[in-house]
C-alpha cells in the first residue's frame, strides 16, 4: 500500500447519494469541514427515486437547491385508477386540501437530476470509488480508514451508504424487520402509444389486482412499476404493461433503465451509537428501508439530512450560543426513528394492497396522505426532548411550521409591497422566533440567542380584517415602519392570523418544525434544552 494520508474534519460522510450529498451541502453552508466518501465510481446516471413530495420541496427551497430542479420536473397532484379500458376515478383532495402549503404537489424528477443539483452546491470533492475499510469510535471522535490509504479523524461520522451500509455493520448496529415475498420490476421508458397520456399517477387494475402503476416523468419519460410472478424479465414486464393498458397500443421506443427490487422492511436499532450519545450516526437507507410504494425513500432520507445537520453543527460547538445539550443528537434518534417506523408501516400497507383492487389501494393512499405528501409528518407526543407540548391556534409544537405569506413594510408612499413566504426567507441552521402579537419583551428576552435565531414579529393588522387582504396560506402584512424593524432588530409584519388579545412566541427549529409555543420565560426554558 502507498503512503498513508491523514486528514482532520468535523464530519466524515460515507455515501454520495441524496442523503449524503444534502448532508454535505448543509454542513458546508454552516461552516463544517467535511469529507465525503462513496464506493460507487460516480454519481447515479439513471434510475432510482422519481418524486419530491411537498415537504421535501420545502426543505430544498430552504437549502437553496429547489430552484434548479423546478424547471426540470413535472408537477403532479392527481392519482387516477384505470380498468377495463377506461379511467374510473381521479383523486387530488389530499393535495389540494393541504393548508399553509405553497407547492401542493409532487415534483416528478429523477434521482440523477437531484444528485447533480446537490453536487453543484458542494464546494468540497466527493471521493467516488473509495471504500471504507474501518471505522473506530472513541469519546472524542471517529477514525475512518479507506482503501485509498486515507485516515480521516472527525468529530462525527455519518453513515448514508445505503441498505447494505458498511458504517452500520462496522458500528455493530442491528437492522431488523421483515421481507415479504414480492419482487417488483421498474422501467424508465419512452413510449410510442395512443394511450391518453396525462401528468397523473395511474394505478391499473386487472383481474381484481393493482399490479401496474404509471408515473409521469421529466423529458417525456414514463416510469412503470410492475409486479410479476415467476421469472422476472423485461419482456414479461412490457407484456404486462400492454395488457393493463389495453385496448390502447403501446410500443416501447427506448427504455433507459430496467431493474428489479425485492421488498424489504427493515430499521436500524439505533440511528446514533451509544444510546443517542455517540459519534456515529445513520441516515437514509442505512437507517431504514421499505417498499417504494408512496415514493418515500428519497424523501425520508432528505428529511433525515435536514433534521440532522443543524444538530451536528451544535454538537461540534460551532456557535457562540453555548455548548449543545446531549439531548440534541438524542432527539434526532428519537424523532427520525419513530418517523421511519411509521413510513415503513405506511409503505407496507400500500405494497400489500397492490394485491387488491385499485379502489382499495387509492383509499389506503388517502388514509396515509400525511406521509405521502410529507406534510403530516409530526414529532408531537413521541417523547422528543426538543419538543415541548404546547399549542396556540395553528401553531402546535412537533408539527411543521406553516408556510405563511409575509408582506414586507411599505418604505415609501406608493411603493409596492413585496410578498415573501416564511420558507423563502428562512435560513437553514437558524432558529426562527415568531413573536406573535408583538410582545415588547420578546426581542430582549431572545438577545442571548441572537446569533442562532432570526426574529419575526407578527402584529394584528386592522387593514387585513377590513379589506380581506389575505391569501389561502394566510398573509402577514408589513407594518409600514420606516425600516420594518423594532429596537431589537426584529423584522415586523402585520397578520390577519393574529387576534387582538394574542401575545406569545413560537420557536421554529432549524428543521422548520415547531419546538415550543408560549411565553418568553418558556422560550428561554426551551432554549436551555438545546444549549447547556
Image: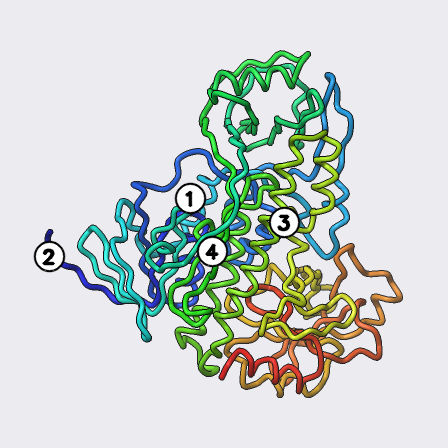
**What whole-number distance in Å separates the C-alpha atoms at marks 1 and 3?**
20 Å
- Mark 3 or mark 4: which comes first in sequence? 3
Which residue is pictured at 76% across the width and 78% down the height? 437
- Residue 116 falls in image quadrant: top left
Residue 72 in view (yes/no): no
Residue picked out by circle 4: 268
Between circles 1 and 4, the one closer to the viewer is 4
Residue 382: x, y in percent?
Answer: 63, 66
Which residue is pictured at 49% across the width and 79% down the height? 325
Residue picked out by circle 2: 3
**What whole-number distance in Å separates the C-alpha atoms at marks 1 and 2?**
32 Å
Marks 1 and 4 in Cβ contact (< 8 Å): no
Q: Callout 4: 10 Å neighbours few (<14), some, many (20+)?
A: many
Residue picked out by circle 1: 116
Question: Is 96 on the left or on the right of 284, as rendered?
Answer: right
Tell me the element at label 4. Answer: strand
- Mark 2 or mark 4: which comes first in sequence? 2
Q: Residue furthest left?
A: 2
Residue 54, which numbered label? 3
Amino acid at each position: 500500500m502507498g503512503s498513508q494520508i491523514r486528514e482532520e474534519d468535523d464530519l466524515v460522510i460515507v455515501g454520495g447519494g441524496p442523503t449524503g450529498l444534502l448532508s454535505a451541502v448543509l454542513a458546508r453552508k454552516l461552516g463544517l469541514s467535511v469529507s465525503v466518501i462513496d464506493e460507487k465510481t460516480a454519481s447515479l446516471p439513471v434510475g432510482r427515486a422519481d418524486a419530491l413530495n411537498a415537504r421535501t420541496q420545502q426543505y430544498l427551497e430552504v437549502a437553496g437547491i429547489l430552484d434548479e430542479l423546478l424547471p426540470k420536473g413535472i408537477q403532479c397532484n392527481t392519482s387516477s385508477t384505470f380498468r377495463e379500458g377506461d379511467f374510473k376515478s381521479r383523486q387530488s383532495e389530499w393535495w389540494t386540501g393541504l393548508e399553509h402549503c405553497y407547492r401542493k404537489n409532487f415534483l416528478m424528477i429523477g434521482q440523477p437530476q437531484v444528485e447533480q443539483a446537490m453536487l453543484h452546491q458542494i464546494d468540497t470533492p466527493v471521493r467516488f470509488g473509495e471504500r471504507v475499510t474501518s471505522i473506530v469510535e472513541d469519546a472524542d471522535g471517529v477514525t475512518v480508514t479507506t482503501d485509498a490509504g486515507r485516515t480521516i479523524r472527525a468529530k462525527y461520522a455519518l453513515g448514508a451508504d445505503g441498505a447494505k451500509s458498511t458504517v452500520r455493520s462496522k458500528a455493530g448496529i442491528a437492522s431488523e424487520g421483515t421481507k415479504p415475498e414480492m419482487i417488483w420490476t421498474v422501467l424508465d421508458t419512452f413510449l410510442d402509444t395512443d394511450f391518453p397520456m396525462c401528468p397523473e399517477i395511474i394505478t391499473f387494475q386487472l383481474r381484481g389486482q393493482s399490479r401496474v402503476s404509471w408515473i409521469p416523468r421529466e423529458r417525456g419519460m414514463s416510469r412503470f412499476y410492475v409486479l410479476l410472478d415467476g421469472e422476472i424479465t423485461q419482456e414479461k414486464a412490457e407484456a404486462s404493461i400492454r395488457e393493463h393498458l389495453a385496448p390502447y397500443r403501446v410500443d416501447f421506443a427506448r427504455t433507459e433503465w430496467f431493474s428489479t427490487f425485492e421488498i424489504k422492511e427493515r430499521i436500524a436499532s439505533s440511528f446514533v451509537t451509544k444510546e443517542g450519545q455517540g459519534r456515529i450516526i445513520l441516515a437514509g437507507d442505512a437507517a431504514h428501508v421499505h417498499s417504494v410504494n408512496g415514493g418515500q425513500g428519497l424523501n425520508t432520507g432528505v428529511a433525515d439530512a435536514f433534521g440532522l445537520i443543524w444538530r451536528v453543527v451544535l454538537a461540534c460547538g460551532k456557535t457562540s450560543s453555548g455548548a449543545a445539550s446531549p439531548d440534541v443528537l438524542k432527539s434526532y434518534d428519537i424523532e427520525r426513528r419513530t418517523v421511519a417506523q411509521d413510513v415503513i408501516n405506511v409503505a407496507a400497507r400500500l405494497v400489500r394492497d397492490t394485491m387488491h383492487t385499485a379502489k382499495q389501494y387509492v383509499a389506503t393512499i388517502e388514509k396515509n396522505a400525511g406521509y405521502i405528501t410529507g406534510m403530516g409528518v409530526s414529532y408531537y407526543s413521541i417523547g422528543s426532548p426538543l419538543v415541548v407540548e404546547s399549542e396556540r391556534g395553528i401553531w402546535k409544537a412537533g408539527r411543521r411550521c406553516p408556510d405563511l405569506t409575509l408582506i414586507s413594510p411599505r418604505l415609501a408612499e406608493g411603493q409596492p409591497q413585496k410578498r415573501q413566504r416564511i420558507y423563502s426567507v428562512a435560513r437553514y441552521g437558524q432558529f426562527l422566533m415568531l413573536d406573535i402579537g408583538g410582545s415588547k419583551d420578546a426581542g430582549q428576552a431572545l438577545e442571548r440567542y441572537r446569533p442562532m435565531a432570526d426574529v419575526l414579529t407578527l402584529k394584528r393588522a386592522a387593514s387585513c380584517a377590513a379589506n380581506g387582504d389575505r391569501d389561502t396560506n394566510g398573509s402577514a402584512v408589513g407594518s409600514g415602519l420606516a425600516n420594518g424593524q423594532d429596537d431589537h432588530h426584529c423584522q415586523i409584519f402585520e397578520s390577519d392570523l393574529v387576534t387582538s388579545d394574542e401575545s406569545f412566541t413560537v420557536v421554529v427549529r432549524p428543521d422548520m418544525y415547531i419546538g415550543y409555543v408560549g411565553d418568553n420565560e418558556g422560550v428561554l426554558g426551551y432554549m436551555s434544552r438545546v444549549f447547556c
